[in-house]
Image (cartoon, rainbow, N blue to C red):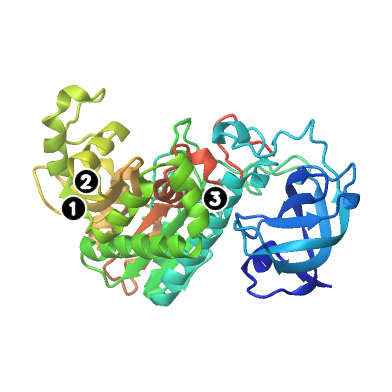
Amino acid sequence: AARLRVREALEAREPAGEVKVQGWVRSVRSQKEVLFLHINDGSSLESLQVVADPSLENRDLTFGSAVEVQGELVKSPHKMQDMELKAEAIRVVGPCDTWLFPLKMKERHPLEYVRQFPHLRCRNNTLSSLLRIRSEATAGIHAFFQDNGYVHIHTPIITSNDCEGAGELFQIETSNEGRESTEKSHFFNVPAFLTVSGQLHLEVMAGAFTRVFTFGPTFRAENSQSRRHLAEFYMVEAELSFTESLQDIMQVMEDLFKTVTTTVLSKCPRDVELFHKYIAPGQKDRLEQMLKTKFVTISYSEAVEILKQASQTFTFKPEWGCNLQMEHEKYLVKHCGEVPVFVINYPYDLKPFYMRDNEDGPQHTVAAVDLLVPGIGELCGGSLREERLPFLESRLQRLGLTDAYQWYLDLRKFGSVPHGGFGMGFERYLQYILGVGNIKDVIPFPRFPHSCLL
Ligand code: 4AD
Ligand code: MG
């Protein structure tokens, strides 16, 4: 018999004769005359209905067990589905102790509950929908860049630089076993860290390929338990050469966001619907509205003025030269009509060494941009990069970083061009489009302070 995935069976238009379907039992209902099963193999949110003679029932055939069903795929007389499987043989491949299994039949478990079982929560509808969406969004992001002439670069995970200069680095330690007696620690005796961003490596490559992107894990040793921070998260980063205006970078961010979201909505409508129905009612309409709206742009200085008008509502008083807090970002998004907002031109002293000097004053700024979105705050961060050797040299000198960044200065000596780019937090992106409150629920295995289960 031909092996069929559940999704193929559900989408079949014609009876398919003798087939074999494998999966996990989502429900068992035993009646006098007939035994109903629903089996799911992760290929779709919907499960396949199996109809069997009660004589095929067996003690191990329970919710959660793994089964192989052989039978005939026929048109279903029930209006809930087009096709069903008329079983001739059911084999329990792996039984499941339903007493101990933390998931229960036909229950909609809260996200906080299933978070306790990172090894089992993918067998739950919400997480399995999330992971299919995550997979489609990943493919959509790669397609967006490949379609627009970008080369994909594998930037390293182990690196010697602190791109953001924020000191949120995880340092690499060689374990005792692997260590030569003379080597004390670190990465074979040289300091090395887990990457916080692939940007500097992308800048190298943009100097040869013009447009490049990367999409991989990044690491931040931020001691934050917030619902939008992880210690390990995925970042989408792009870098473009021959770019003189921040607007060009912002256009790519907006196009990426809208194109990928449109793809996800059309590729997995049922999975997305689950979130928009049960987790974030109203999010579907807001998202569709947003896809039709041009994102708003304001400058950092304007943002501070807007915030000052509402000073009394904040714990942190807004002041020119200070970082925008989550509460400030939320207020700005609301003020602009609950649409995504670009905030541009941040104070020079707030931002990393690589950002391009706007040479203005007395309020000195750099050509930086953050994209803020409803419910989340910062989704993307980007900038024009300082491509002028004297500016970069003097800034690195003042920071005492000249030695470490000789190679980066080199890039400004051998065919330097105006360039810029950005990074988008992939988990925050998923949180936003699906309306998920906690970032721990949009990644398969979350890592955050004091937690590294599995
Ligand atoms: O703003 P960030 O720090 O920018 C950079 O790293 C740049 N070097 C990117 C570039 O220009 N190529 O981080 C980019 C985005 C943030 O806007 C946020 O969405 C996400 O990464 N992010 C996090 N997501 C989850 N957990 C964390 N701890 C995050 N830190 C940043
Ligand atoms: Mg940032």
Nearer-N-terminus badge (1/3): 3
**Vertically, is 116 above or below 302?**
above
Q: Does the residue labelled 2 lie within 8 Å of ligand 2?
A: no
Q: Mark 3 points at which residue?
A: 130
Q: Of the residues shown, which amino acid type is indicated by label 3?
A: Leu
Q: How far apart are marks 2 and 1 (CA)?
A: 13 Å
Q: Where is residue 396? Give x, y as percent.
A: 32, 50
Q: Can residue 300 be seen in this view?
A: yes
Q: Is mark 3 within 8 Å of ligand 1?
A: no
SS class, disc 3 = helix
Residue 260 falls in image quadrant = bottom left
Q: Distance between the residues labelled 3 and 2?
A: 35 Å
Q: Where is residue 123? Give x, y as percent.
A: 68, 46
Q: Name the residue under label 1.
A: 297
123 or 409, nearer to the observer = 123
Residue at 25% over, 52% down: 368
Of circles 3 and 2, which is in front? 3
Q: Quadrant of the C terminus?
A: top right
Q: Is residue 41 visible?
A: no
Q: Name the residue under label 2.
A: 346
Of circles 2 and 1, which is in front? 1
**Vertically, is 169 above or below 54?**
above
Q: Where is residue 352? Give x, y as percent.
A: 32, 47
